[in-house]
Image (cartoon, rainbow, N blue to C red):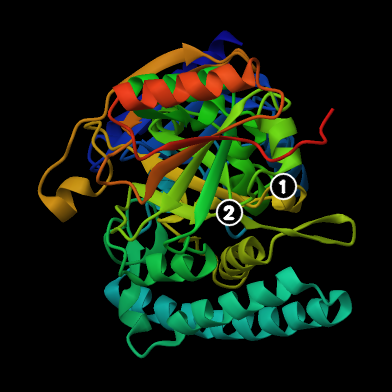
Amino acid sequence: MGEDFTKIKKFLEQLEFLLIRINGAELIRETYVEYAGKIRIIDSLILVNKKPLAVFEFKEDLASLNNTQVTELLEALKVDCRYVVISNGTVSKIIDTYSSKITSVNNPRELVEVIFKEFSLEQVWQKKLKIIDELKKEFYTFKRELNGINNKLKNEILATKIQNITPALELFESDNFLEKIEYDQDGQFYYLSGDIRDFHTLENSFFHRLVLDVDPGTKIYRYTTLDSVFKTIDNTKIRLSGIVGMNDISEVGYVDSYLDKKYIPMSNEIMVDSINRKFIMCSSILEDELMQWRLYGDDCKGACLVFDVIPNDELPGLLLRKINYGIQFNGKNFHPELELIMRIKKRLRKNLGIEFKFKTLEIWKYFFKSFEYEPEKEVRLLLIGNKQNVIKGEKKLTGVGTPIEISWNLTSTHQILAPYLYLSVDDIRLRCKLEKVLLGAKCPELLLNLKQFKLLLNRKNLNHINVNPSKISNYR
């Protein structure tokens, strides 16, 4: 074993020396990821600009493993990376997880040449042409299958989805679409060009058609506890909770898990930092609705904040949108919009051996949920902070970036350490204005609290906000 360790140590030293010459590349020795609630040790990892490119697993008996056994070992590792390298310190087998191709190399130099292969401008151009051809075929097949499902289900929600998906796909048929495709040499993937903070890019326009806006004049209702509403009025601030501390913690990775069953939420420091800069406030378009009171209004003992959606420009990092739900099909959750994205990625991986990334999905993925939640009719306020703790895109669009103050707490429901922040109720960046407070049918001392809340609102110069009791009178 000592000889094997020395061999692997020398292998890593040679690899580290080679990576010094590659901009943004670094070797991480012995790290870990979390999978299914357990810690999984990773022998080594190559990062490029802090993004994982290759994972290493060292096996003494590598020479005796055939390609089928190597593939089985890859499945057991449960990692999400472009390359998985299984090595004994001399011979290495490189698995390209996009194409499933296995390449054997005999030294670190050959290994680097494989995983850092470069494409010429002509090769990239030819790949782009093939991408367009594959997308046309996929869109045709997808629309045909979706219409077939709709003919079978005759589902009103699905019919509406098809109406929204069709113009979204038409964006990819524009004359200059070829020019919108870019290749990232470091990460070795293709993507749609444009600053993700610019709402007018092709990709943002695509998601705008899938994730519906909330019309001005719409009323949205945030059902919560009496204490939470009191603090909102007393502090004249609206609380947004970090996504990690949400009631349904499965939402953190809903979209990623739908697109990739191997997805590991919060598996590295980069992902942890990213998700801890995202905050939400959940509400609904359902007015004074019994189930909402039961689920979120402390069983009718709580209260409800009523907001009026106003005309206002959105910031890329401060969005108010309706949740896009899946539908039930063959007894399972089926999400057409996510199916489309998944099929694009899978088709290009299988037929062209390339990765295609939707870079703005990191923003829009928090507006998708499973069909089970559709009765809630949720509207979500999403705030994304950048590394300078300013709302993403605010400084770019307005020239001014107002710092956001982030605090932390241990959530009462799941005992998860999570961040949160406050926004003023009259923050000019918001697209919703607080106009009313409803007190639940079982609110303690209802008549007295109605008077007390009115008095508090008056003293906080919030006279435009009304206080009323819930109209639900038959709840026991």
Marks 2 and 1: in contact by CB < 8 Å?
yes
Where's residue 369, x and y in %? 65, 49
Q: In this view, does 83 lie to the left or right of 300?
A: left
Where's residue 356, x and y in %? 48, 63
Which residue type carries mark 1?
Tyr
Of labels 1 and 2, earlier in sequence is 2
* Helix, strand or loop status at disc 1: helix
Which image quadrant is residue 153 in?
bottom right
Instruction: Name which residue lies at 36% across and 51% down.
Output: 431
* Helix, strand or loop status at disc 2: loop
Q: Is residue 32 visible?
A: no
Q: Mark 2 points at which residue?
A: 323
- Kindly report the distance in space between the C-alpha atoms of the residues bearing marks 1 and 2: 10 Å
User: Which residue lies most toward the left here?
Assistant: 399
Instruction: Name which residue lies at 22% across and 40% down.
Output: 21
Which residue type carries mark 2?
Ile
Number of numbered discs visible in the structure rendering: 2
Q: Mark 1 points at which residue?
A: 373
Q: Is residue 428 visible?
A: yes
User: What is the crowding at mark 1: few (fewer than 14 residues within 10 Å), some, or many (at least 20)?
Assistant: some
Check the image and report above or below for 12 versus 148: above
Instruction: Name which residue lies at 63% across and 15% down.
Output: 445
Instruction: Name which residue lies at 66% across and 31% down.
Output: 296
Q: Please identify the quadrant where the C terminus is shown.
A: top right
Identify which residue, 170 or 96, lies in the foreground.
170
Where's residue 207, x and y in %? 47, 65
Where's residue 326, x and y in %? 71, 58
Q: In this view, does 306 lie to the left or right of 128?
A: right
